[in-house]
Image (spheres, coloured by chain):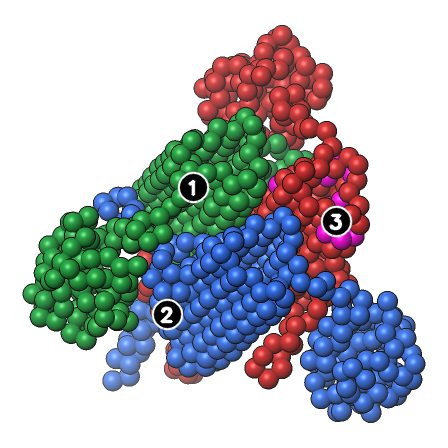
Chain colours: A blue, B green, C red
Amino acid sequence: MALRLGTIVQDLGGELLGDPNLDIEGLAPLETAQAKQLSFLSNPKFQHQLASTAASCVIVSPAMAEEAQKHVACIIVDQPYLYFARLTQLWRKVHAPLPGPYIHPSAVIDPSAQVHASARIGALCVVERNARIGADTELKSGVTVGERCAVGARCVLHSGVVIGADGFGFAKDGDRWEKIEQLGAVQIGDDVEIGANTCIDRGTLSDTVIEDGVKLDNLIQIGHNVRVGRNTAMAGCVGVAGSAIIGANCTIGGSAGVLGHLVLADNVHISSFSLVTRSIHKPGHYTGIYPLEDNSSWEKNAATLKQLAGLRERLRALENELKERKK
Amino acid sequence: MALRLGTIVQDLGGELLGDPNLDIEGLAPLETAQAKQLSFLSNPKFQHQLASTAASCVIVSPAMAEEAQKHVACIIVDQPYLYFARLTQLWRKVHAPLPGPYIHPSAVIDPSAQVHASARIGALCVVERNARIGADTELKSGVTVGERCAVGARCVLHSGVVIGADGFGFAKDGDRWEKIEQLGAVQIGDDVEIGANTCIDRGTLSDTVIEDGVKLDNLIQIGHNVRVGRNTAMAGCVGVAGSAIIGANCTIGGSAGVLGHLVLADNVHISSFSLVTRSIHKPGHYTGIYPLEDNSSWEKNAATLKQLAGLRERLRALENELKERKK
Amino acid sequence: MALRLGTIVQDLGGELLGDPNLDIEGLAPLETAQAKQLSFLSNPKFQHQLASTAASCVIVSPAMAEEAQKHVACIIVDQPYLYFARLTQLWRKVHAPLPGPYIHPSAVIDPSAQVHASARIGALCVVERNARIGADTELKSGVTVGERCAVGARCVLHSGVVIGADGFGFAKDGDRWEKIEQLGAVQIGDDVEIGANTCIDRGTLSDTVIEDGVKLDNLIQIGHNVRVGRNTAMAGCVGVAGSAIIGANCTIGGSAGVLGHLVLADNVHISSFSLVTRSIHKPGHYTGIYPLEDNSSWEKNAATLKQLAGLRERLRALENELKERKK
């Protein structure tokens, strides 16, 4: 379980200032790294940790190189964090390489489904009628891909993911609900990763679409007819209601939500716990979080919040009164 | 994959103004419909789309009929959206009819469980000891119905649903938690639909109850001892804490919550992302959402919110001061 | 399905005032209990129910004993609720004893995994390479324990739990995301209970850690590198972002959240629906919930909330003006 520094830079590039024969036995954060471990410095505000780290080598940007090499061997690269990401991939490839293509014997694959010969289908997966799984895509255990749904190439779907359950569509008939059959499917692009127990519903008439490069964390709900644009990323527990159209390169924080039928432009960033209640046409960072307080302060402020419109009126009345008096 | 207009009105009723021999090849929203597609107009505010739609036929209410028939064939019915729902069912029945009753060989059904002969049990389902599955009910793949839990007739449970996990009950014993065994079960009525990965916990002493006609979306958590009244619908990611009693014909928006032991009357409607913190005895529409803003505005307003009770005091002081001066 | 009062106090202790030969046929809340049922009174505010209960026996504290025995047989113990918890365990042991150790034949257990001989592994579970399952631990059906993850002794993992999916880690490479392989695992202590469909992600470089005695409800998301301290309990739908460190004996209410990299001290209690946005170093009760209102009031107050910082400025201006005039 070791990797020579020389092997690393040979594989991933970067300028090594240090002994290429040094064996690296692990990767670790700068603060907790031990001898024979390799770390990285991405955020300059942690620069002071260079002096005290026990790491044997640190990945740094050119700007940090001079300071770093006073204390420790280093690999100099333009984007240390990105380099670190690739290093984790190299590490895994060397120490725990993925198996070749396989379909676990416990998986239930409909004969009409098209599973690419290079795909890996884990234990207890279900791939239904006319579903398609692309090249080099991996379904971990217990993933469901519903009928006619398509997953692109190089995707990873984690355990418990459900692709293509019925969208939530009903018409009122008096008090009871009449089901609207969900006749569409789900189309997932290439290089998409979907976290454990996340659900993406099939469209009503056309398809729910997840574009290339989208990254979804665990326990996310994507409603029917939604479109999520390229490279958009969502953290855990997000809910996107039906027919929302989300642009490319967006980020949506954990437990945030998007109401139905809204449109979000590209490069929109939504904070955790914030609900998007109207379309957003301008890139930017949007937030709607009730601030945390100790409970007794919260009780007072929240009670007052319910009178806020009234307070505004009273303030206006005072302003008018003072204006009057000036006359 | 086509259906004649004449067949449709013969099956579902409605007055057809147009050629009964016309073949419909798909259903689509009014705005995106193509030739040979059938659409519907439910909300009068989209009436202007009638003039430009490429649809071959539109389902409309009597009030829209005159305008509609200037542009396109139409089916006139009192409730276009409800008719559309039934049309999706017809469409599915004709083009992708459900299979007959079956139990997938990979499902794990306890010998003591009672599965109705007309039920459909998907791949990798688990139906435990003494559980009951009603007539014409469908369990998609990977559904768990725990011991002694009962599911009524004509229900649909989507993939990953867990019925009858233990409710979350513990008593404190110093710092540690002593488990309260959950001795009840779950009773689900008829015509209930439950979305993917939704969980309904078993009751502590008596049963958690989901009444007839309830519709639950994906990733919902229903705690132990809860009762959900007839025809109530909940959108994705809702959490209902233990022992809450929710009335009939309620709607609960996505990611909303209901605290434990509360009572909600019939016909209560809770907005998305809102937390119900007290019982609601009056039908109506209730909301508690922090409004979304651009992040810098939010920072200012949220910081001020923490001083809100103080602002009210200062306002009151000013009001008093002005009153004093008047004397 | 009955248990003599004498047997109960023999097993669990407590002073019985009543006939030890009385057969108890069920446990029930005080308010709804019937004859031959045993109930408990924990909260003194429900003391008035003693007079009207139909229960045959009530578990009470010494302070309630005098009042209780006027109406009904009773078992006197210091902590009635804790005694009730143990009684549910006795009830279950007698009426529905757990089976001995087993591995369901449909479970997929990697040959390298170490499953303790006393563990119970339910239907359709997946236990991956080098995973470990401790003594007397029970995996209900459909649980996944990923490679190298370890679950301690006497744990209960409910259906659909996913331990060890990849943490959500990516580095930006222009617009696209480069995956950071998650090289750590998950370590779960002893006496941990994890609710249905809850997910605990594996760490990036080191392990995600759930300490002894932690209780997690359903549909919770625990991000990579998180540590949850001893005996901390979380209600359903909570999300804990990556690298958060949560202390011991904390409680986190339903649908609450903790942002990444934060530290929470021991004995911190977070209300439902509240987002922790900064580290909390002081034990206490913290809340951040937008209060629920009828929708029309909410509309007015929420609109005003967006002007709150401005209102504060106007208030300050008025205060200054009045001060000026006084001079």
Instruction: Tell me what residue is drawn at x 18 percent, y 58 percent.
Output: B5
Front tag of 2 and 3: 3
Residue C209 against residue C309 in the figure, above or below: above
Residue A104 against residue C159 in the figure, above or below: below
Label 3's element? Answer: loop
Q: Residues within 10 Å of mark 3 (few under 14, many from 20)?
A: some
Chain assignment, label 2: A
Foreground of the two, C305 or C295: C295
Residue A64 horizontal/vertical position (percent): 77, 88
Foreground of the two, C300 or A143: A143
Instruction: Tell me what residue is drawn at x 46 percent, y 79 percent.
Output: A266
What amino acid is at disc 2? Leu
Q: CA distance from mark 2 to mark 1?
A: 33 Å
The C terminus of chain B: image quadrant: bottom left
Residue B48 seen in the current view: no
Q: Is residue B47 left or right of residue A111?
A: left
Residue B27 horizontal/vertical position (percent): 28, 62
Residue A262: image tag: 2
Instruction: Tell me what residue is drawn at x 69 percent, y 46 percent.
Output: C108
- Magenta stretch prevailing secondary structure: loop
Q: CA distance from mark 1 to mark 3?
A: 32 Å
Q: Residues within 10 Å of mark 1 (few under 14, many from 20)?
A: many
